[in-house]
Amino acid sequence: MSNRAERKLEHIQHALTTGQDRTNGLEDITFVHQSLPNVSVTDIDLSTKIGELSLSSPIFINAMTGGGGQSTLEINKALANVARETNIAIAVGSQMSALKDKEERPTYEVIRKVNKSGIIIGNLGSEATVEQAKQAVDMIEANALQIHLNVVQELIMPEGDRDFTDVLNRIEKIVSAIPIPVIVKEVGFGMNKEVAKKLKEVGVCVVDVGGYGGTNFAKVENLRRESVLDYFNQWGIPTAASIAEVRSVDEQMSIIGTGGIQNALDIAKAIGLGASAVGISGYFLKVLIEQDAKKLTRLIEQMKLDLTLLMTALGTRTIKELQLAPLIITGHTHHWLTERGIDTKRYSLRTKE
């Protein structure tokens, strides 16, 4: 097994060990109760769009695995089955390992083999070229491509990148060169409004905030180091604040809320802040590994049902209406957004009409 493949397996093991500390800021979000919702459970439509990509549900399995030999092939096969059975989208882990080692291609290709007509999202790092992006898309017949930004993870990673120049230019070239949506994704440290603005200017229409509060890749990489850079373990923008930051840039930009999402109320809050979809990775992986695929399938179906009930209580028939449900922002998230010049009253005084 290559060093890269071994690293992929270490990432999975350490991600499960470190878990999620749930400091994503969503505890600071409270919906304004509606005593006259004027809807029925049967009225609720969970379908949504990210960019031009239509999804049956805002919930999807976010990037996790691939490139770690037979072990990750089996994980991706199981996840693909779950995605097919629940009719939700699925993203793969970084495909760079398969581009550099063809023996790793089956660990990604298995997802399309199992989930022939499903929505599958490819994944590469910000070092990727246009040609590599095209190869990654072709490898799994991807419906969209994630380009992940993970500066802090790379800096802590003993064998990680140290040069982050010209990333925006490479992203712009990929956006122009491939005919499917390009999603720019943070990896657990959150995205700020200034970065979102720069991405919008080069044609990116979908961002995944990858907020602080979920799987902590600083802790994961520090477990692989002899000298620990522990000052990065609490580094990042919490998920709630990050979604609001990006939403303040452009009402039309599609936002994927990720970072410590574990239940339907988390999902509803992320959408209420402005997300169009919500990706879950570490929590789903933990359920799959520690229990089984059937349990994960049941969990996802229960999340859909719970989200339907929450939307009914709020009187919001669609995801777009849920994005306009009035909510109150308190605590650290309120302080953060106020200091960043983002008006929180726009959330509390709005209506879906």
Image: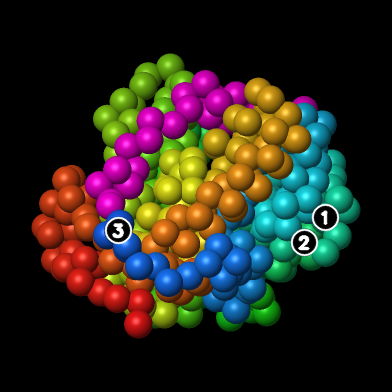
Q: Which mark is residue 118?
A: 2
Q: Position of residue 284 (x, y in %)?
A: 60, 38
The N terminus: image quadrant: top right
Q: Are marks 2 and 3 in contact (CB under 8 Å)?
A: no
- Residue in front for this viewpoint, 340 or 302: 302
- Give, as a single range, the part of the protein colored magenta: 1-30
Q: Residue at x 57, y 71 (%)?
A: 43
| Circle 2 or circle 3, nearest the eye | 3
**Residue 272 lies in the magenta-colored region:** no
Q: Looking at the picture, does residue 57 appear above or below residue 155?
A: below
Q: Mark 3 or mark 1, which has the lower sequence index?
A: 3
Total labels: the figure holds 3
* Structural distance between the alpha carbons of marks 2 and 3: 36 Å
Q: Residue at x 49, y 43 (%)?
A: 263
- Residue position for label 3: 33
Q: Residues within 10 Å of mark 3 (few under 14, many from 20)?
A: few
